Image (cartoon, helix red, strand yellow):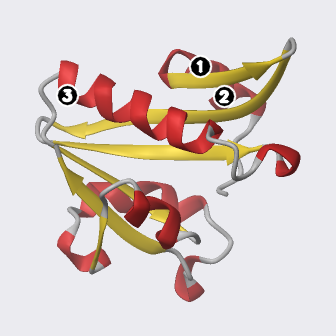
Amino acid sequence: MLFRSPADIYENLQTFSVVELDGRIVGCCSLEIVWADLAEIKSLAVDEAQKGKGAGRLLVGAALEQAAALGVPKVFALTLEPQFFEKQGFAIVEKEQLPMKVWSDCARCTKQQNCDEIAVLKVI
């Protein structure tokens, strides 16, 4: 997951959804609108002890619902776990199919030239 400073988190807090269990946050996810027809699922994280129990599926579902409500027809993610997204109806795509604006976060990433993330896309 790309590092986010506390200032960046607070600045983008309204874009996050969380899953809470027994008063504890066990997962989070952000939906960022990139363009009129494209949004990105970012910062999807689930507590290790809760993986496989549906929190990630709930978060991605909420992000897709939010995108649909906003009229954004395509949602993508950059991930190290493409199989998870494929189970949610996403397809693996070439990163080069995504617009250049998507890569603005890459400038801050330590992996820049050695990126191992896989692009996935869903048309809703």
Q: Are marks 2 and 1 in contact (CB under 8 Å)?
A: yes
Q: Is residue 87 left or right of residue 107?
A: left
**Residue bearing mark 1:** 13
Q: Are marks 3 and 2 in contact (CB under 8 Å)?
A: no
**Residue bearing mark 3:** 68
Q: In the image, what residue type sits under mark 1?
A: Leu
Q: Would you identify the image quadrant in which residue 55 lies?
A: top right
Q: Secondary structure at mark 3?
A: helix
Q: Which residue sits at x=18%, y=73%?
A: 97
Rounded to the nearest angstrom, the CA distance separating label 1 from label 3 is: 20 Å
**Residue bearing mark 2:** 9
Compared with 33, 51 (above or below) is below
Q: Is residue 49 left or right of residue 104?
A: right
Which residue is outermost to the front?
A: 53
Q: Is residue 113 left or right of residue 61?
A: right
Q: Quadrant of the C terminus?
A: top left
Q: In the image, what residue type sits under mark 3?
A: Ala
> Residue 123 at x, y = what percent?
16, 51
Q: Nearer the viewer, residue 23 or 102?
A: 23
Q: Nearer the viewer, residue 106 or 122?
A: 122
Q: Which residue sits at x=56%, y=23%?
A: 17
